[in-house]
Amino acid sequence: MSTTTLAVLVPVLPFLGAVAGLLLGRTAPGLVRPLAILPTLGAAVLAVFVAVRQDGGPAIETATELTPTGSVPIDLSLYLDGFAVLVAVLVGVVATCVQVYSTAYLRDDPRYPSYAALVSLFTSAMLLVVYSGDLMVLLVGWEVMGICSYFLVGHYWETEAARSASLKAFLVTKLGDVPFLIGLFALATDADSFQITKILRTVASGGLDHPTLIALLLLAGVAGKSAQFPLHTWLPDAMAGPTPVSALIHAATMVAAGIYFVARLLPVFEASRAALVVMAVMAAVTMVGSALAALAQDDIKRVLAYSTIGQLGYMTGALAVGDRAAAVFHLLSHGAFKALLFLGAGVIIHAAGTNSLAAMSRMDGLAKRIPDAFWTMTIALLALAAIPPFAGFFSKEAVLVAAEQTATGHSDTAPGAAGWLVLVAGVLTALLTAAYATRLWLMAFRGRGAAAPDHGREPVAMTGVLWLLAVPTVGFGLAAGTLADWFGGRELTPTMATSVLGTGAALIGIVLTYGLWQRAAAQAAAVGATAGATAAPAPGKAPAGPATGAPGTAPAPASVAAEESAESAALAAVSAAETPEVAEVTHDHPAVPAGPAPDPGRALLGPLHRHAADGFHLDAVYDRLFVRPVRAAATLVRFLDREVVDTYVRGAGAGPRLLGGLVRRAQTGNVQSYLSALLAGAVVLAIATAVLANVNAGS
């Protein structure tokens, strides 16, 4: 079987599995799990075969005309270069892990058949984007992913959070897709083709008439799909969906599609240096802003969501300095450890019964209850923090090396300003990333308080997947040297300067966060001891609450630290109660006792904490700038429609109706009245005729 035939089967198999799952989900429920896992597994295996056969050599191309259009043709084509085949392997492996994991995580979910089918369709759409050599066919996969994300994020449609999140994800990404579609048509018009190879040849020959405009239009769609500033706000809210969906979206589909698109068409963006600077600014703001926001989140999944936004910012930064090898390298390594982080977070949520880090910090022994998740998430967090020798270190260093070369003038692909922006923001984000990764680990696994509930070992389908993903998280960076041919011959080795900068910043973030956590834990223990002493009853008296007089209620401490801790506990309780993820948990969980939660993020951010926790109020800004004016315009249009347009319509009907009423009054049915009216009319006509005749005769 030829390589192109195998490549065609890679997206087709999950698509057939999705169709079969939707058709047979109700009538043959026993086939749902095999139809979810086997086609996706088959696609992953075939993707590996395609990558081996491609072997990092010249791109494999094939095309056939899909339909005549009368102008720019649309072709059904494949374009298999080293980047495409490696990304397809990532998509297949992560999607298979998600499907296996979901069989245990959602085993009691009544909507599992439709969920599994949508995950397969999601996978098929991403594989179509990866392998497609024609932009219109790529657009089909691009939009199908948007529809699938809408349904999967809104899987728990009974909750307001899921309904709002799915709608927000759909609308924000569509907002970027409108200019994206215009940019595609403009690009195809200049190149006279939608085929990627012909477009790249046109760019090489200087045939683009409006390179800056086209690049910026395409960049708007990429910002929406890959959650880059300012269209990133949908991604944290999308955590209302099931955790395995989050793993798939963040690691291997959807958000990766935008980065991959720019990497594939990078010469189009390099044709405009202004577009590269805009991309660098977008990447820098995204990296730093998302890392600050991650430090203030209480929901473990929202921490990881902002982490994804920041890591995508690294990839965008690598593209902004013209190094697609570094961008795709980080995309691949990030896909492995981010899938591991989300699936590990699912195990934690499954065991703890809450998404709240503050609540977990008041549980003792959670790490011992879930040792598989503890060790594998520790590995993944080290990779996220870019600590050597884990995969994240090598891929992040590749980005920093590319930025350094551009900033110091060793590469003239992009302006030096873009290089400095990406380099400075990248080093600062390395420090912040290590800080929030350490904060997550300490609050989730080093809690102090009541014993964590013990439900026995988690299912093998969940823990086995974690260890499988831990392998590339540890070894992919070390093995990257053997994959140089797939990265276009680019050596992705770190330099001494960037290694010292990046790793030094990460170590500073880790040490600083650990020290602040110890101080916060000591303060929380002191507050708890003070509260316990205050709550101790006098001999012969029962304790009473200060406000309600309820027995056993201690009065609130008077110190500021106690007030902050109480506020933190209240926020944590609200977060845990409102999180739809709890609905997935099948165990009975005791209520987590309220109390102070040691959070080093508050000390690190200081006055910024409140703003960072709310995503720097971007949703409120967008509400004032866009949502309210649109709603006001809609109210005005509704008023004009009802009070002006409808008035004319009603008037057009009322006039004939009034005239008909007047005519109806004359229809009495009396013959004498009709004859009298006829005679009167004849007399009037005779008189009028006589008068007119006299007037004419006199003139």
Image (cartoon, rainbow, N blue to C red):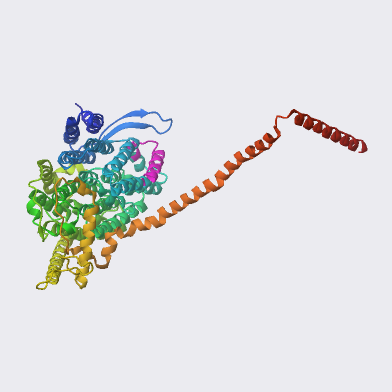
Please identify the dominant SS of the magenta region: helix
Q: Position of residue 581 (x, y in %)?
A: 21, 48
Quarter where residue 520 is shown: bottom left
Q: Where is residue 5 in the image (x, y as percent from the top left)?
A: 23, 28
Is residue 31 in view from this perspective?
yes
Residue stretch in magenta: 176-199
Where the N terminus falls, by quadrant? top left
Quarter where residue 616 is shown: bottom left
Instruction: Judge by depth and name the residue closer to the eye, 432 or 355.
Output: 355
Where the C terminus falls, by quadrant? top right
Q: Position of residue 476 (x, y in %)?
A: 14, 46
Q: Where is residue 593 in the image (x, y as percent from the top left)?
A: 15, 59
Above or below for 251 versus 534: above
Residue 178 lies in the magenta stretch: yes
Residue 497 lies in the magenta stretch: no
Above or below for 435 versus 7: below
Quarter where residue 687 is shown: top right
Instruction: Judge by depth and name the residue closer to the eye, 533 or 652.
Output: 533
The count of marks equals: 0
Instruction: Judge by depth and name the residue closer to the eye, 404 or 457.
Output: 457
Q: Is residue 398 left or right of residue 283?
A: left
Is residue 416 in view from this perspective?
no
Instruction: Judge by depth and name the residue closer to the eye, 623 or 67.
Output: 623
Above or below for 502 versus 525: above
